[in-house]
Image (cartoon, grey):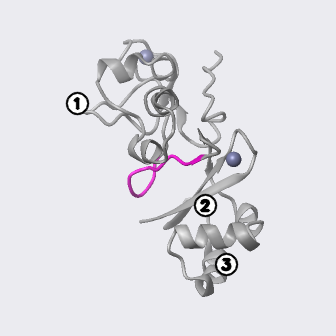
Amino acid sequence: MILPLFKYHPNPIDTGAIERTEEACECCGQARGYRATSTIHSVESIETICPWCIADGVAAKKFDGEFSDSHPLLSDGIDREIVKEVCERTPSFISWQQERWLSHCNDACEFHGDADKSDLEALTGEDLNKFLNAEYIEPEFWSHILQSYTEGGDLAVYKFKCRVCGKDQFYSDCS
Ligand SMILES: [Zn+2]
Ligand SMILES: [Zn+2]
Protein backbone atom coordinates (compact mmCIF):
# COMPACT_ATOMS: atom_id res chain seq x y z
CA MET A 1 0.00 0.00 0.00
CA ILE A 2 1.35 3.42 -0.92
CA LEU A 3 1.03 6.08 1.73
CA PRO A 4 -0.41 9.45 0.75
CA LEU A 5 2.11 12.20 0.01
CA PHE A 6 2.46 14.95 2.55
CA LYS A 7 4.03 18.02 1.01
CA TYR A 8 5.17 19.40 4.37
CA HIS A 9 6.13 16.05 5.93
CA PRO A 10 7.69 14.06 3.09
CA ASN A 11 9.09 11.07 5.04
CA PRO A 12 6.65 10.41 7.89
CA ILE A 13 7.81 6.80 8.35
CA ASP A 14 11.43 7.94 8.81
CA THR A 15 10.48 10.66 11.29
CA GLY A 16 8.37 8.21 13.28
CA ALA A 17 5.18 10.18 12.64
CA ILE A 18 3.52 7.22 10.92
CA GLU A 19 3.84 3.69 12.29
CA ARG A 20 2.43 0.25 11.51
CA THR A 21 -0.63 -0.86 13.39
CA GLU A 22 -3.27 -3.56 13.32
CA GLU A 23 -5.79 -1.17 14.86
CA ALA A 24 -8.70 0.26 12.93
CA CYS A 25 -8.75 3.98 12.24
CA GLU A 26 -11.27 5.75 14.47
CA CYS A 27 -12.22 8.00 11.60
CA CYS A 28 -12.90 5.65 8.65
CA GLY A 29 -13.22 2.46 10.68
CA GLN A 30 -10.79 0.56 8.46
CA ALA A 31 -7.62 -1.22 9.52
CA ARG A 32 -5.28 0.02 6.80
CA GLY A 33 -2.02 -0.94 8.46
CA TYR A 34 -0.76 2.49 9.48
CA ARG A 35 -1.54 5.20 11.97
CA ALA A 36 -0.17 8.55 13.08
CA THR A 37 1.85 8.43 16.31
CA SER A 38 1.00 12.00 17.27
CA THR A 39 -2.73 12.27 17.44
CA ILE A 40 -5.16 15.09 16.81
CA HIS A 41 -5.71 17.92 19.29
CA SER A 42 -9.45 17.75 19.80
CA VAL A 43 -11.97 17.52 22.62
CA GLU A 44 -12.42 13.79 22.01
CA SER A 45 -9.42 11.65 22.79
CA ILE A 46 -8.59 9.82 19.60
CA GLU A 47 -5.79 7.27 19.46
CA THR A 48 -5.77 5.85 15.97
CA ILE A 49 -6.05 7.85 12.77
CA CYS A 50 -4.84 6.47 9.46
CA PRO A 51 -2.69 8.59 7.10
CA TRP A 52 -5.46 8.67 4.48
CA CYS A 53 -7.96 10.30 6.84
CA ILE A 54 -5.27 12.87 7.67
CA ALA A 55 -4.35 13.56 4.03
CA ASP A 56 -7.87 14.21 2.80
CA GLY A 57 -8.82 16.34 5.80
CA VAL A 58 -11.65 14.04 6.91
CA ALA A 59 -10.22 13.44 10.39
CA ALA A 60 -9.67 17.15 11.11
CA LYS A 61 -13.26 17.83 10.07
CA LYS A 62 -14.82 14.90 11.87
CA PHE A 63 -13.03 15.50 15.18
CA ASP A 64 -12.92 19.27 14.75
CA GLY A 65 -9.24 19.51 15.61
CA GLU A 66 -5.69 20.15 14.44
CA PHE A 67 -2.69 17.84 14.29
CA SER A 68 -0.32 20.75 14.89
CA ASP A 69 -0.83 24.05 16.61
CA SER A 70 -1.64 26.68 13.99
CA HIS A 71 -0.61 29.70 16.09
CA PRO A 72 3.12 29.72 15.30
CA LEU A 73 2.48 29.67 11.53
CA LEU A 74 -0.34 32.19 11.71
CA SER A 75 1.78 34.56 13.76
CA ASP A 76 4.55 34.19 11.14
CA GLY A 77 2.00 35.54 8.65
CA ILE A 78 1.76 32.34 6.61
CA ASP A 79 -1.13 32.05 4.17
CA ARG A 80 -4.19 30.45 5.79
CA GLU A 81 -4.49 27.77 3.11
CA ILE A 82 -0.92 26.64 3.83
CA VAL A 83 -1.58 26.69 7.58
CA LYS A 84 -4.66 24.55 7.06
CA GLU A 85 -2.71 22.05 4.99
CA VAL A 86 0.00 21.73 7.66
CA CYS A 87 -2.24 21.70 10.71
CA GLU A 88 -5.26 19.80 9.40
CA ARG A 89 -3.95 17.57 6.61
CA THR A 90 -0.37 16.69 7.69
CA PRO A 91 0.77 14.29 10.42
CA SER A 92 2.45 16.10 13.28
CA PHE A 93 5.28 14.88 15.49
CA ILE A 94 5.79 14.04 19.14
CA SER A 95 7.64 16.70 21.06
CA TRP A 96 8.23 17.54 24.71
CA GLN A 97 6.31 20.80 24.59
CA GLN A 98 3.58 21.89 22.21
CA GLU A 99 4.92 21.35 18.70
CA ARG A 100 5.95 24.41 16.70
CA TRP A 101 5.89 24.20 12.92
CA LEU A 102 8.56 26.43 11.40
CA SER A 103 8.27 28.64 8.36
CA HIS A 104 10.74 30.37 6.04
CA CYS A 105 10.43 32.43 2.85
CA ASN A 106 6.69 32.89 3.48
CA ASP A 107 6.00 29.17 3.33
CA ALA A 108 5.71 26.46 5.96
CA CYS A 109 8.83 24.26 6.03
CA GLU A 110 9.04 20.52 5.51
CA PHE A 111 9.46 18.59 8.73
CA HIS A 112 12.42 16.18 8.78
CA GLY A 113 12.35 14.79 12.31
CA ASP A 114 15.06 14.93 14.96
CA ALA A 115 18.19 16.63 13.75
CA ASP A 116 21.18 14.33 13.76
CA LYS A 117 24.48 15.37 15.24
CA SER A 118 26.02 16.15 11.86
CA ASP A 119 23.16 18.57 11.09
CA LEU A 120 23.97 20.46 14.25
CA GLU A 121 27.72 20.35 13.67
CA ALA A 122 27.10 21.87 10.24
CA LEU A 123 25.33 24.80 11.87
CA THR A 124 27.90 27.60 12.05
CA GLY A 125 28.44 31.33 11.75
CA GLU A 126 25.42 33.56 11.24
CA ASP A 127 22.98 30.61 11.08
CA LEU A 128 24.21 29.28 14.40
CA ASN A 129 23.97 32.72 16.01
CA LYS A 130 20.41 33.12 14.78
CA PHE A 131 19.45 29.70 16.10
CA LEU A 132 21.05 30.27 19.53
CA ASN A 133 19.40 33.66 19.78
CA ALA A 134 15.98 32.36 18.86
CA GLU A 135 16.28 29.45 21.28
CA TYR A 136 17.75 31.49 24.16
CA ILE A 137 20.82 29.25 24.29
CA GLU A 138 23.99 30.87 25.62
CA PRO A 139 26.72 30.51 22.98
CA GLU A 140 29.22 29.19 25.56
CA PHE A 141 26.93 26.23 26.31
CA TRP A 142 26.55 25.22 22.70
CA SER A 143 29.65 23.00 22.42
CA HIS A 144 28.61 21.20 25.60
CA ILE A 145 25.08 20.67 24.26
CA LEU A 146 26.49 19.43 20.98
CA GLN A 147 28.76 16.93 22.74
CA SER A 148 25.97 15.31 24.70
CA TYR A 149 23.31 15.59 22.00
CA THR A 150 21.54 12.37 21.07
CA GLU A 151 18.46 11.99 18.89
CA GLY A 152 15.42 11.55 21.09
CA GLY A 153 17.28 12.82 24.17
CA ASP A 154 16.11 15.26 26.86
CA LEU A 155 17.10 18.12 24.63
CA ALA A 156 15.50 17.62 21.27
CA VAL A 157 16.34 19.59 18.14
CA TYR A 158 13.88 19.30 15.26
CA LYS A 159 14.90 19.76 11.69
CA PHE A 160 12.86 21.51 9.04
CA LYS A 161 13.75 22.40 5.48
CA CYS A 162 12.58 25.46 3.60
CA ARG A 163 10.81 24.42 0.38
CA VAL A 164 11.71 27.71 -1.28
CA CYS A 165 15.41 28.34 -0.54
CA GLY A 166 16.31 24.82 0.63
CA LYS A 167 17.87 25.97 3.90
CA ASP A 168 17.60 23.81 7.03
CA GLN A 169 15.81 25.33 10.00
CA PHE A 170 15.92 24.07 13.55
CA TYR A 171 14.30 24.55 16.89
CA SER A 172 15.00 23.01 20.24
CA ASP A 173 12.76 21.63 22.90
CA CYS A 174 13.42 20.34 26.43
CA SER A 175 11.79 17.67 28.54
ZN1 LIG B 1 -8.96 6.40 8.38
ZN1 LIG C 1 13.72 29.87 2.84
What residue is shown at x 48% (from left), y 28% (from top)? 35
Tag of residue 44: 1
For the residues labelled 2 and 1, the Cα–Cα distance comes to: 31 Å
* 139 over 169 or under it: above or below: below
Q: Name the residue type under label 1.
A: Glu
Classify mark 3: residues with Cα within 10 Å, few (<14), some (14-19) or many (20+): few
The residue range painted magenta reads 94-103
Q: Nearer the viewer, residue 131 or 35?
A: 131
Q: Name the residue type under label 3.
A: Gln
Dividing the picture into quadrants, the one containing residue 157 is bottom right
> Which secondary structure dominates the residues rendered in magenta?
loop
98 within the magenta span: yes
Asked if one can make out residue 128 in the rendered structure from this viewpoint, the answer is yes
Tag of residue 151: 2
What residue is shown at x 67% (from left), y 78% (from top)? 147
Element on which disc 1 rests: loop
